[in-house]
Image (cartoon, rainbow, N blue to C red):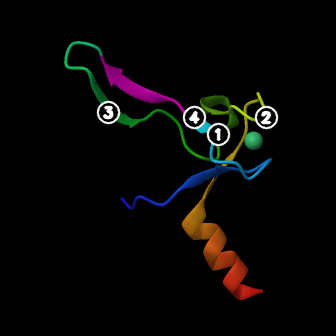
Amino acid sequence: MGKSKVTCAKCGGTNVQTAVWYAPNSSMVLDSFGSWNEKDTNWCEDCADHVLLIDEDVVVMRNAEE
Ligand SMILES: [Zn+2]
């Protein structure tokens, strides 16, 4: 998995969160809980709303096509 930025589909900001599985006994964050395309598991601090997230790499590819 790459380290590209994931942004809010609504405002384009990077102040976003996504739900993950967390192991309390080992203080480890495991896999993502949902996906970028599932509003329920994502949150944007700037929009203060559940949003879709966009992987920056995909956006770069889209812009290159135009
Ligand atoms: Zn946003």
Whole-percent x, y for residue 40 in the image: 66, 29
Which callout, 2 or 1, points at the residue further toward the start of the chain? 1
Which callout, 4 or 1, points at the residue further toward the start of the chain? 4
Mark 2 is surrounded, within 10 Å at the Cα level, by few (under 14), some (14 to 19) or many (20 or more) other residues, namely: some
Q: Is mark 3 within 8 Å of ligand 1?
A: no
Which callout, 2 or 4, points at the residue further toward the start of the chain? 4
Instruction: Please say if 24 is above or below 60.
Output: above
Q: Are marks 4 and 1 in contact (CB under 8 Å)?
A: no
- Which residue position holds label 1? 38
Whole-percent x, y for residue 16 in the image: 62, 39
Look at label 3 and name its amino acid.
Leu
Mark 4 is surrounded, within 10 Å at the Cα level, by few (under 14), some (14 to 19) or many (20 or more) other residues, namely: some
**First to last magenta residue range:** 17-23
Look at label 1 and name its amino acid.
Glu
Q: Secondary structure at mark 1?
A: loop
Which callout, 3 or 1, points at the residue further toward the start of the chain? 3
Whole-percent x, y for residue 60 in the image: 63, 74
Residue 5 placement, left or right of 64: left
Look at label 2 and name its amino acid.
Cys
- Which residue position holds label 4? 17
**Along the line of sight, which residue is nearer the eye, 5 or 61?**
5
- Which residue position holds label 3? 30
| Nearer to us: label 3 or label 2 | 2
Quarter occupied by residue 39: top right
Look at label 4 and name its amino acid.
Gln
**CA gap, disc 2 and disc 4:** 12 Å
Residue lying furthest left:
26
Q: Are marks 3 and 2 in contact (CB under 8 Å)?
A: no
**Can you tell which mark lies on residue 47?**
2
Q: Quadrant of ligand 1?
A: top right
Q: Are marks 3 and 1 in contact (CB under 8 Å)?
A: no
